[in-house]
Amino acid sequence: MNDIININISGMIVGYILLLVPLAIILYQRVPILKDTAIALVRMTVQLLFVGFYLQYLFKLNNVWLNLLWLLVMMVVADGSIIRGCRLRASCFAIPVFIALFIGTAIPVLVFVGIILRRPDLLDAQYAIPIGGMVLGNCLRADIIGLHGFYESIRTHEKAYHHTLAQGARLQEAIAPYVRDALQSALMPTVASMAVIGLVALPGMMTGTVLAGANPMIAIKYQIIIMVGIFTGTTITVFAAIRFTTKNCFNPFGVLDRTIFRSK
Amino acid sequence: MIDAANNELALDINRISVRYDGRWVLRDFSLRLAQGEKLTLTGPSGVGKTTILRCVLGLVQPDHGAIRINGQLLNEYHVWNIRRQLAYVAQEPNLGSGPTRDVLERPFAFRANSALKNNLHRVPELFDRFLLPHHLLDKDITNLSGGEKQRIALISAILLERPIILLDEASSALDADSKRAVIDYIRQVPDLTVLAVAHDDEWQAFADRTISLTSPKVLLHE
């Protein structure tokens, strides 16, 4: 296969010029997202450049502890994003959600790198960082949908929930339908994207691998495994996040503690 | 009339006080109910009647005082067992969603009620008794009228065979015939202890005792 073609500065400038089209449409239609778009573009550029520089060193050093630290930093950032996104109180959620993210990310990464790719070094930067990042990114999205859906749904349907407790349900029995709905909402985007992958969209990882010069069949095999990893990771993390947080969020009588919600 | 002092107590509420947002909605409230006794609580809105029922169910925790049900102290350890002795019918029952038949079957999926599943055979008889047409079993519960939902909630409570039933304006949406059918049924179960919140004369006539809560129970937090 061909070596990957680097994008030089002028190429990057052309890429950014392409943004004039969506920005013109936004301005013409007065869509109120101009400020958000500008902030997002600046953040994306700065964050990715920073990560790019950092990853260059990370890959060069390929130190297990440094790789682990990087993954943990990503998890802490994801943890904060989830709690902010769900409008929940950090003191109740930060630690259990972090543990859920850790388990949901670690299992697919270790299986992928250790068992499938048989790398002697489980935290090899070339594999653990991008795979961990992809799984974690999806866990973040799924946790926001799942946790927010779970707690908001119980708050909205509090009367029905209390009625279930009054009928003699234990806590796990009473929350079971809400766990089911939260898992369904959180997993549906991954299930939907698995169903159309390759037909409607070529996924980013596969496209990147092909652009980097890999054989498309190899890229597809990687993509299949990563999709399975993402699905596994998101399912584990959402389920674990709900299970781990219920202890702090319901009182010993099974009643939802309303102080877990941050006011808007 | 049953004398609560001379019978084993089904319910013993001892000087409970409840505060919401710094405001006392209930202060030093006490009530004793003998087994099989039927008591109606009346009083103006906001006086704390529903709060009393919610305290008994362990859904609201009093700031002070204690509640015992059949001699067992209501606390975080016993609440799960205590709820197996109680049935609750709310003024506007929220029974979830789905066909009425599923709503009636749902509580029997809980471990506490699994041994009672055979009681479902009583559903047709109870539908007749409470003047409900059988085709409602296949209708979605959310499409039923307030009165129909109240009677379904009552049937669901009866099927659970609890010794104590808590009724919160449980017949407020019923017509006169349906209300009479409900009251007649509850009256003819001698062992059933009933704590009913109600305004109308029929419930007051039905009860062994009526307690009227008045505004002095509602005191502003100093």
Image (spheres, rainbow, N blue to C red):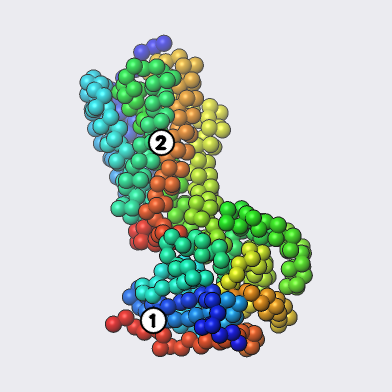
Q: CB of mark 2 within 8 Å of CB of mark 1?
A: no
Residue B136: where, in percent of width, then height?
73, 63
Q: Depth check: give the residue in front, A195 or A87.
A: A87
Residue depicted at x 38% and y 75%: B65
Residue B97: where, in percent of width, then height?
61, 58
Q: Quadrant of residue B197?
A: bottom right
> Tag on residue A198?
none
Q: Is residue B98 visible?
A: no
Image quarter of the C terminus of chain B: bottom left
Front of the two marks 2 and 1 = 1
Q: Amino acid at mark 1?
A: Arg
Q: Quadrant of residue A134?
A: top left
Establish if A224 lies above or below B222. Answer: above
Image quarter of the N terminus of chain B: bottom right
Establish if A156 lies above or below B215. Answer: above
- Residue pointed to by mark 1: B27
Residue depicted at x 47% and y 68%: B72
> Tag on residue A104?
2
